[in-house]
Amino acid sequence: MSLPDNMTARDEILGRVRRGVARPDFAARRAAAEAALATPTRGPQPHMVADTAALRARFADKATALASSVESVATLAEAPAALARYLESHGLAKQAVATADVGALDWMSEGISVAVRAAVDADTVGISGCFCAVAETGTLLLCSGAETPATVSLLPETHIALVPVARLVATMEDALDMVRAEFGGMPRALNFISGPSRTGDIEQTIVLGAHGPCRVHLILIGEAS
């Protein structure tokens, strides 16, 4: 469809929006949409055993299949030593940025220099916590905010996530229900992370780290009950 000489594609799009808003049934359609968002329904879901041990095993299997690496420790205090082992095994410098929720751990006891701030291009390792993790898909859910800037998990080549076993849920729907319950709604931004960044744009060959971290290492924290 050609546009009049004095009309741009932007004008056409905005015109369609204005015409839609002006329809007499707009208020009813908006109310129906808001009601649907307020009371989300669940579609078909896989049967999953909901005990902690089963969720932990499923999450670790799925995360590993997505090219993440996984290590388990019993307590949060053991996370610095686990990270030190990982950095040494990959020949990475013991220097990182971290979100505030995990920045106060005793990283220096393992010789790891950690700055609590948003990441910049020069940072090579980012350490974050996570809001929760989805066992069904091996996915992390991170909520961005002033204390948990998204750049820490997106910019560095290596992303380390501390994952409390107590925050494992079975499905994506369970994760979103937890967000609504604890935030009273949806925060400004949610980031779902399923392994390292990847693309298959070039000759359909999978390349890791194309648009974000090329390594994702998950430290599971807590005993399975």
Image (cartoon, helix red, strand yellow):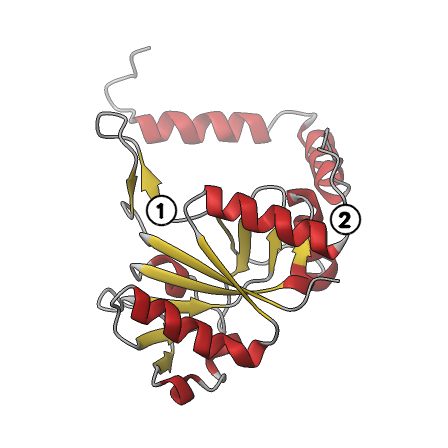
Q: Which mark is residue 46?
A: none
Instruction: Quadrant for residue 86, please give it.
Output: bottom left
Residue 99 in view (yes/no)? no
Q: Please, what is the three-letter code of the amino acid marked with disc 2?
A: Ala
Instruction: Quadrant for residue 158, please give it.
Output: bottom left
Query: Viewed as shown, does residue 62 lie left or right of 66?
Result: right
Looking at this view, is 49 or 144 the one in front? 49
Q: Is residue 43 above or below residue 70?
A: above
Q: CA distance from mark 1 to mark 2?
A: 29 Å
- Indicate which label's residue lies in the foreground, 1 or 2: 2
Point 45% across, 43% down: residue:
66
Point 31% across, 66% down: residue:
89
Looking at this view, is 75 or 205 the one in front? 75
Crowd class of label 1 (few under 14; some 14 to 19; many from 20; radius 10 Å): some
Q: Is residue 198 above or below residue 214?
A: above
Q: Where in the figure is residue 170, as x and y percent of width and height?
A: 69, 47
Give SS at disc 1.
loop
Query: Viewed as shown, does residue 180 lie left or right of 202?
Result: right
Do callouts 1 and 2 mark residues in contact (Cβ within 8 Å)? no
Which residue is disc 1 drawn over? Answer: 197
Query: Viewed as shown, does residue 50 lie left or right of 87?
Result: right
Point 73% across, 40% down: residue:
48
> In the rendered image, which quarter contains the N terminus?
top left
Crowd class of label 2 (few under 14; some 14 to 19; many from 20; radius 10 Å): some
Which residue is disc 2 drawn over? Answer: 50
> In the rendered image, which quarter contains the C terminus?
bottom right
Q: Please, what is the three-letter code of the amino acid marked with disc 1?
A: Ser
Query: Viewed as shown, does residue 148 lie left or right of 33?
Result: left
